[in-house]
Amino acid sequence: MASEWWCAWRNFCLALIQLHVSAAKSENLRRACGLVREASAKGAKVVALPECFNSPYGTQYFKEYAEKIPGESTQKLSEVAKECSIYLVGGSIPEEEGGKLYNTCAVFGPDGAMLAKHRKVHLFDINVPGKIQFKESETLSPGNSFSMFDTRCQLLIYPGAFNLTTGPAHWELLQRGRAVDNQVYVAAVSPARDEKASYVAWGHSTVVNPWGEVIAKAGAEETVLYTDIDLKKLAEIRQQIPILSQKRCDLYGTEMKKLKWKRMRGSQSSLFFPSSEQPQIRTESSTAERFHQNLFLYMSERDT
């Protein structure tokens, strides 16, 4: 059913929730779910929350706010996704498992099922003298696998919390670069800016089309950013500049490790999830292209 629902879409509405995150987890969850309902009522079929939406972003907070998955936060996301019959990208939350902490994003389908769980692979460490010093690696452990499921929506969503140093320098630049070199829509969703927080997020949640044009951009305050995603336009751009068909796999290849492509039990959609026990997998042209075309969730790996 899910795959048929998606294949019928030529255009759909995407909503990015630029949430003001407080120190009260229960309030963060209440506000997040309320804004998800608001976005759904306005026609959004895919809704995304920002990085660390239930917790202040900071190494001193991760242990205190961490929870199991499934747990309180993911249960509420599952319920609201089912209630609204939407795809919900749950930003990220601090996750605890086996004595380790992770920066983890969970994604839910219209039936409330958790479709994917992604642990941030590349942790964010930065030291710019006189501006900012921050090390996720002081408290967090990195994930060790890709998280992927196939919706054919050709959209990359990055929940991220860039700061006042990396934000103006890299936020839009990286999104436009990824949109052009993969010929996909790219959406990056940030927490709202709080000047009183120990870590001040940049804000400016943004959507970029496959031509590299910014088609929607928020300010720094709490808001919901709406964008119509036009898959016909994406197909036209790929025909105009056929990057994928011109890849030289006789000269280079794409290699993935610790990734298992597997259909989820009971699912009618094309859903895949990773296994850390799988041997190295080398992907040839068709698989590599499918990986780029169909990747829906890819946590903010470049930096925050």
Image: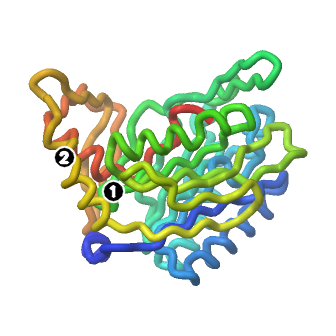
Picture coordinates of residue 274, whole percent (x, y): 34, 42
Residue shown at the point (27%, 70%) measured from the top left: 3
Above or below for 65 versus 35: above
Mark 1 neighbour class, 10 Å CA radius: few under 14, some 14 to 19, many 20 or more? many
Q: Quadrant of residue 30?
A: bottom right
Q: Are marks 2 and 1 in contact (CB under 8 Å)?
A: no
Residue shown at the point (44%, 45%) measured from the top left: 298
Q: Which residue is mark 2?
A: 242
45 to the left or right of 219: left
Q: Residue furthest top?
A: 129
Q: Which residue is mark 1?
A: 154
Residue shown at the point (65%, 51%) measured from the top left: 190
Q: Quadrant of residue 216?
A: bottom right
Say what amino acid the circle numbered 1 marks: Gln
Picture coordinates of residue 92, whole percent (x, y): 60, 49
Residue shown at the point (14%, 43%) measured from the top left: 245
Nearest the eye: 70 or 123: 123
Above or below for 42 versus 286: below
37 to the left or right of 246: right
Residue 112 visible to an observer of this rendering:
no
212 to the left or right of 238: right
